[in-house]
Image (cartoon, grey):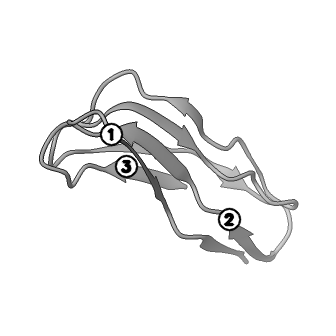
Amino acid sequence: MTLTIPNDLPGSITDISVADADIPSGLKGQPVKGKLDKPIASGQSFTITYDVTSDKTGTYTLGAATATFADSTGNYQKISSGTAILTVI
């Protein structure tokens, strides 16, 4: 899985916390949770990649990931991804 946090704002974003949804039953993996230790500059992004595996075929819905951050004026904002559908064949 790949989780990318983009910064489309005019200034850097800081104090970034990330919380991925729990991994659904039937899949194995460790969801991402924690804080970034550096800001993301305007026009840049930060990408986290991790493995999700399964021993069974099926279709799984992965919940949304959420990021909270302070914009360049100090206001806190929250963004969320959509859900993702994973099919194991």
Q: Residue at x 87, y 59 (%)?
A: 25
First reached walking from the N terminus: tag 3 or tag 1: 3
**Quadrant of the frame with the N terminus:** bottom right
Q: Is residue 60 left or right of residue 63?
A: right
Quarter of the picture containing the C terminus is bottom right
Callout 1 crowding tier (Cα within 10 Å): few <14, some 14–19, many ≥20: few
The residue positioned 15% from the left and 44% from the top of the image is 42
Residue drawn at the location 32% of the way across and 24% of the way down: 38
Residue type of the residue flagged with mark 3:
Ile
Residue closest to the eye, 40 or 50 = 40
Residue 62 image label:
2
Measure how far apart labels 3 and 1 are at the Cα level.
Answer: 17 Å
Question: Residue 44 placed where, x, y %?
Answer: 20, 45
Looking at the picture, which amino acid does disc 1 mark?
Answer: Asn
Residue linked to disc 1: 75
Residue found at the far top of this picture: 37
Q: Are marks 3 and 2 in contact (CB under 8 Å)?
A: no
Q: CA distance from mark 2 to mark 1?
A: 29 Å
User: Judging from the image, what secondary structure is the residue with disc 3 in?
Assistant: strand
Q: Amino acid at mark 2?
A: Leu
Residue annotated with mark 3: 5
